[in-house]
Amino acid sequence: MKSGILKAEGFLRFFSLGLLALTACLVGLDAQTKEIFFSLERKATFRDLNALLALVYVDSIAAGYNLLQLSKCFFISGFNGNPTGSYKNLAWVFFFLDQMAAYVCFAANLAATQASLLAVTGASQFQWMKICNRYTRFCIQIGGALLCGLIASLVMAVISSISAFNLFRLYSSKQFLVLKGK
Amino acid sequence: MKSGILKAEGFLRFFSLGLLALTACLVGLDAQTKEIFFSLERKATFRDLNALLALVYVDSIAAGYNLLQLSKCFFISGFNGNPTGSYKNLAWVFFFLDQMAAYVCFAANLAATQASLLAVTGASQFQWMKICNRYTRFCIQIGGALLCGLIASLVMAVISSISAFNLFRLYSSKQFLVLKGK
């Protein structure tokens, strides 16, 4: 019998896993070729911007991490009521890993969003041209991918709150960092 | 008598308040003028990049938020052991506010870092020029400010963990979302 919170965590992890994989695929497979002169062609891919390259790697790794954690949701049948020893240590490890995963994933998505925003607006003071009026289809696909990625980041923030809940509920509400069982 | 966790929270809030204010000042007061032609001058300020403008606003607001929360650390003398009613609701509000502040602050600093990184490296595929070889002193000051801002973001992530601790320790370790006192 799985507990409700473990089911919720499993569902959220599955959801964010899907969104992260979708983001990585949408960005990684996006390409558009444009003719600049009569025979000279330029192909826009995600490798043109370092932020998009980083996004593909980070989101793939985060998807893999969520897959590993999903297997945990299948094999562990929930907290058995004894907040000592290995369960507590494991809860601390998951807490740190989930916090890190949430912030790193959020960071990668935001950096890519910022770089893409510059490609849409340009920066006239720096004479950086707009790119998206030339590679429109490419930019729309990137935009969709970034939306998926940001939703996945929000879901991972919720997951990190759940793992904080799983850890901190073990502690006494009256004394600082004293376990409840004691 | 203040509890240890409240003291730690107050210290961390004071620290991040100082760093956030420093970041906003360093970015906001940064300016460098360069001669382009014989009499034509160009002044680089934080208004040239939207991400830096957003950073100044967000970091100022986050510093103000931390100031408000600091006053809480002074006037509330800690959790009195009764996890019902107003204390629990307040803990939920602080939890959400702190999580939001941490992510928004992190987002603003990262977006500014990404945009500044593009100013350092340029993007040759898009014919975006490097800016920092011309406005070197300006860029170094921005770099220092971003470092302060990222440290402040990490401190705010720790603060949000503390407020998660303050909230979730109220709940039972055996049942889902059942208060301990019941």
Image: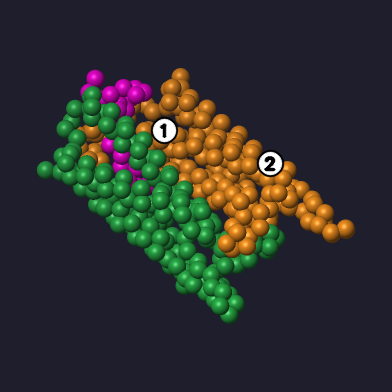
Chain colours: A orange, B green
Q: Residue at x 50, y 35 (%)?
A: A155
Tell me if residue B175 is in the magenta stretch. Answer: yes
- Left or right: where does residue A180 sit relative to residue A89? left
Is label 1 in contact with label 2 (beta carbons under 8 Å)?
no
Residue for badge 1: A162
Sequence-earlier tag: 1 or 2: 2
Question: Please, what secondary structure does the residue beneath circle 2 have?
Answer: helix
- Left or right: where does residue A177 sit relative to residue A45? left
Q: Residue at x 30, y 26 (%)?
A: B172
Mark 1 belongs to which amino acid? Ile
Residue for badge 2: A141
- Where the C terminus of chain A falls, by quadrant? top left
Q: Position of residue A2 (x, y in %)?
A: 46, 22
Mark 2 belongs to which amino acid? Gln
- In this rendering, does residue B14 appear at all? yes
Q: Nearer the viewer, residue B121 or A91?
A: B121
**What segment carries the magenta color?**
B154-182
- Residue most toward the right? A39
Q: Position of residue A86 (x, y in %)?
A: 37, 38
Tell me if residue A18 is in the magenta stretch. Answer: no
Quadrant of residue A81 within the rendered picture? top left
- In this rendering, does residue B161 appear at all? no
Residues beneath discs 1 and 2 located on the same chain: yes
Q: Nearer the viewer, residue A83 or A31?
A: A31
Question: Mark 1 packing: few (<14 Cα in 10 Å), some, or many (20+)?
Answer: many
